[in-house]
Image (cartoon, helix red, strand yellow):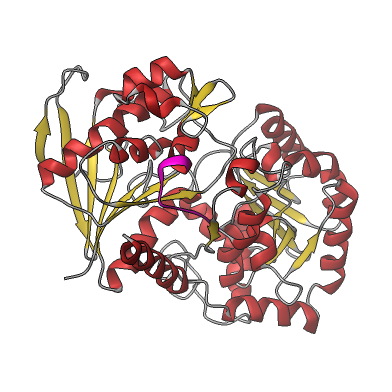
Amino acid sequence: MGRQIAFVSSEVHPYSKSGGLADVAGALPLALAKLGLQVHVFSPWYSSLKATPELIGTLDFEWLYQPLRIGKISSQGVDFIFLGMHAFDRANYYGYFDDVRRFSAFCRAFLPVLGFLELKPDVIHLNDWQTGLIAPLVTHSNIKAKLVYSIHNLAYQGRWNIPEVLAWSGLPPEVAGQEGLEYYGDASCAKAGLAFSSAITTVSPTYALEIQTPEYGEGLDGFLRSRSVKGILNGIDTEYWNPGTDQFLEHRYKTLEAKSAARAALCQELGLDASRPVLGMVTRLTDQKGLDLVLPALPEIVKDWNVVVLGSGEEHYQNAIKALKNQMPSQVAFSDKFDEPFAHRIYAGADAFLMPSRFEPCGLSQLISMRYGTIPIVRYTGGLIDTVPESRGYGFHDYQTGAMLEALTNARRAWKTEIWQGKARAGMNLNVSWDAAALEYQALYARLLVES
């Protein structure tokens, strides 16, 4: 019987998703299960969950106003366990004033749920701040599991005042020191995960180095330098993201030549001039994703490219892109509605994919675009450095609009040439599955258990 892994995430594809964390939580556990590990994934039971779990029990707590519902969905050898409470019966997953309180309650309920399920995991694998308080809760319990904390984006901390976090989570005061969850006078749920875990990982080797510097360390660089941080590059679900079988594509393809039908279909759908190269973006409209570079450059970009953007975020970005779309409907397309099928059509139909991120822990869009024969144009940071060499795409180092435009110009000049086709084929032939990452995580778990 394989080792038992409890994998905890605030979102998990295909049941709940706002970003790349959900893709990781949905795909990595399946890859680990294929290696013989017994994996249970724990996540909130949102009212907007894309499936209805089987209700397998309820628990009553003095600190919770209503019974905790426990649900289960089994898929491909993995049990997905959902914890339901009133705090998650809202339109969105995050973005509320009481987010720290909501996820403190989720963390506090986790250990009793393990007991209810009679699970004794060997490793508890936590992901980002929403799960961070589980680490000190386990440390101050009788559970002997090893703790792994994965950083997906260190910019998000789950920060609140210490007394209330201790009250909400049920943690003792001794965890609140500088070597615990204290962060510049407040409590940081992310710091709690980092401080009390047996191992810290993040989602690319370069990001692991970057967060140990003041520029990217979010005030935790010194703390992280005192610990060992391992970067394990994310993969993608290559069965779901497969241009040859993609359920959302009318024109599926297995070769670069056959991609032209998907491209023509996207241009026809959006009313774009098909004689011009198509530049896609599927992104959050925020500074982190480089929109402060893109916005002032859009009038220049559309001289050479059709631009297709799918994303929502800061209102001034949305309004500016909408205005340009209205002015130039044959050159600019934009949707601010979450639309998974449209995202797939962009990855398949675009010629290139722009990711000018200010920072990018790993990035999944560049991996998806390469699999679809769509060349990534990236700012060299984090996982984009690790995944987009010159042989597979184009990039720039300086976080400046001029540097981005130069990379776009170089790509535009190469469009339709043998150089372009070589980069596109190299991306399509790259193995971007979770297999390699799963083996690294399996080895990490094994090392931790041998050391115990």
Left or right placement of residue 155 versus residue 149 in this view:
right
Q: Is residue 295 above or below residue 206?
A: above
- Residue at image position (57%, 42%) is 154
Q: Which percent across, then down, holds residue 271? A: 67, 53
- How many numbered circles are shown? 0
Residue 355: image quadrant is bottom right
Point out the image quarter for the C terminus. bottom left
In the rendered image, residue 157 lying in the magenta stretch gets the answer no
- Residue at image position (21%, 20%) is 64
Q: Which residues are magenta?
A: 195-203
- Residue at image position (56%, 20%) is 185
Of the pair 364 and 193, the residue shown nearer to us: 193
Of the pair 404 and 274, the residue shown nearer to us: 404
Q: Which percent across, then down, holds residue 270? A: 63, 52
In the rendered image, residue 202 lying in the magenta stretch gets the answer yes
Q: Is residue 31 visible?
A: yes
Q: Which percent across, then down, holds residue 231? A: 55, 60
